[in-house]
Image (cartoon, helix red, strand yellow):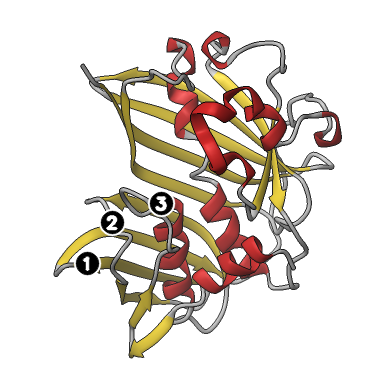
Amino acid sequence: MPTALDNLIKLLDLEELEVNIFRGVSPKEERQRVFGGQVAAQALVAATRTIEFGHVHSLHCYFLRPGDPRRPILYEVDRIRDGRSFITRRVVAIQHGRAIFNLDASFHKDEPGLEYHAPMPKVPAPEELPTFAERVAPFREQLGDWVDRERPIDIRLCDPMNRPPEQWREPQAQAWLRTNGTLPDDPMLHAYILTYASDMTLLDTTVRPHGLVWSPDRKLMMASLDHCMWFHRRFRVDDWLLYSQMTPASAGGRGLATGAIYTRDGNLVVSVAQEGLIRQLE
């Protein structure tokens, strides 16, 4: 298993301090704040450690304060309800004595039901698209060694290489993603890692209509405010998944984006929604 992916799995392996209380850490990297996808995934791990059956079918998160990447994060789980088919958990992430994040997650025992899903958009195959390193090569001087860092998630944007980011004005974006390595056959591990990855590109969709996806002189503050996911079907995140994203609105310093995640054979497996801060700076 590549080192970056192995490190991500270790990052999600929380320490149990007491009944319903877990501790997580952040990577030893130079960051201003903890990555939101990391906190959401770790909180889901904490919730899952307290259930006896079922698989996550929905989660709803609020990012309350920036996380301090230099300090551990405590996750306190509230066992809201244990039913015969559904289990509900609330998780609060705490640093410096204050809540920085909270998660509500619901777990459902598998059962048969009606089947339908919206069709997958037609996009180029991931093998036909440039890697992340190839995509950002023109910006190597501005980005430095960050370009060559090993990454746990392989993301292939579907935008043509001959269009610079400031010309990406459509209110939708398509991207393929998968882990850089094979994972064990644990469906919850795949759910944790997709929760982590789902926060990596979604908010950028909200600034596409404004030509602000990325530029060296972009003066924009962006941060996730809330994040929701609905898990419809099982999937493997070490197989290619298409992340189809769009933004219906931006106003008042905030932007809303929605996402639909498909398996390569066209099954819709997860739906996502996120609102984020997109505050322009002077």
Residue denoted by label 3: 35
Residue at the image point whose x is 37% and y is 70% from the top: 89
Q: Dot 3, crowdedness within 10 Å: few (<14), some or many (≥20)? A: many
Q: Dot 3: what SS?
A: loop
Q: Give the spatial CA distance, label 3 vs label 1.
A: 14 Å
In the rendered image, the quadrant that contains the N terminus is bottom right
- Residue marked by disc 2: 67
Q: Which mark is residue 95?
A: 1
The residue sitting at 78% across, 25% down in the picture is 123
Earlier residue among tags 2 and 1 = 2
| Apparent side of residue 202 relative to residue 110 in the rendered image (left or right) | left
Q: Amino acid at mark 2?
A: Gly
Mark 2 closeness class: few <14, some 14–19, many ≥20 residues within 10 Å:
many
Identify the residue at image location x=51%, y=76%.
13
Residue 243: give x, y in percent of width and height. Answer: 64, 37
Residue 121, disc: none
Q: Amino acid at mark 3?
A: Phe
Structural crowding at the residue carrying mark 1, measured as other residues with C-alpha within 10 Å and reported as few (<14), some (14–19) or many (≥20): some
Q: Is residue 120 above or below residue 93?
A: above
